[in-house]
Image (cartoon, rainbow, N blue to C red):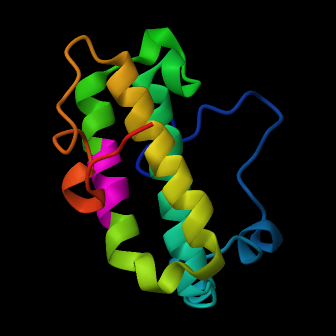
């Protein structure tokens, strides 16, 4: 049985449940919320953009530095659309982060076109409704 909050631990002999001192140092949900509250908005936005960018690169495949076994163009399209929407919505707030993020988005869009069996027309590719047509 896998370990979760609702089932007992299948710990090997000699291992025990955490002591009260150990559980006192474990962060609670309230601690996690307070920690999130201290992170600046731009950091949350850039982390989200980087996660979308990384996931999209994996789904595009070798053309974007990903692994061919994980290539899934439908998933890549959805992730690139989400990234483009986030970048467009947060454009005024990105400041010095804007250029590297938009460059990464453009590179993903071009890699997607290169990896596609039937490339979209300029202006019809993933995210291009937010960014406009992307050309090399």
Q: Report if residue 83 lies within the magenta region.
A: yes
Q: Is residue 98 visible?
A: yes
Q: Position of residue 81 (x, y in %)?
A: 27, 50
Q: Residue at x 83, y 34 (%)?
A: 14
> Which of the 4 image quarters holds residue 21?
bottom right
Left/right of residue 47 with respect to residue 116 in the rendered view: right
Write the start and end of the magenta stretch as one range.
Answer: 79-85
Q: Position of residue 50 (x, y in %)?
A: 55, 54
Q: Is residue 33 visible?
A: no
Q: Report if residue 117 lies within the magenta region.
A: no
Q: Nearer the viewer, residue 53 or 34?
A: 53
Q: Main secondary structure of the magenta part?
A: helix
Q: Residue at x 75, y 46 (%)?
A: 16
Left/right of residue 127 with respect to residue 37 in the rendered view: left
Q: Nearer the viewer, residue 102 or 59?
A: 102
- Which quadrant of the rendered structure holds the C terminus? top left
Q: Nearer the viewer, residue 16 or 43?
A: 43
Left/right of residue 46 with respect to residue 61 in the rendered view: right
Q: Looking at the picture, does residue 133 appear above or below residue 108?
A: below
Numbered circles on residues, count: 0
Q: Looking at the picture, does residue 114 appear above or below residue 79?
A: above
Q: Position of residue 104 (x, y in %)?
A: 54, 48
Q: Looking at the picture, does residue 52 appear above or below residue 96?
A: above
> Which of the 4 image quarters holds residue 112?
top left
Q: Residue at x 55, y 59 (%)?
A: 101
- Which quadrant of the rendered structure holds the N terminus? top left
Left/right of residue 65 with respect to residue 63 in the rendered view: right
């Amino acid at each position: 049985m896998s370990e979760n909050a609702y089932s007992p631990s299948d710990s090997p002999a000699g291992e025990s449940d955490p002591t009260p001192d150990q559980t006192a140092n474990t962060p609670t949900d309230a601690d996690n919320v307070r920690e999130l509250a201290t992170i600046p908005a731009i950091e949350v936005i850039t982390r989200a953009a980087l996660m979308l960018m990384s996931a999209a690169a994996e789904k595009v495949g070798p053309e974007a530095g990903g692994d061919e076994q994980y290539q899934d163009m439908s998933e890549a399209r959805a992730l690139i659309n989400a990234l483009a929407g986030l970048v467009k919505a947060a454009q005024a707030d990105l400041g010095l982060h804007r250029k590297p993020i938009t460059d990464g988005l453009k590179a993903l869009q071009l890699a997607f076109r290169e990896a596609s069996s039937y490339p979209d027309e300029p202006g019809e590719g993933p995210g291009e409704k937010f960014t406009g047509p992307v050309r090399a």
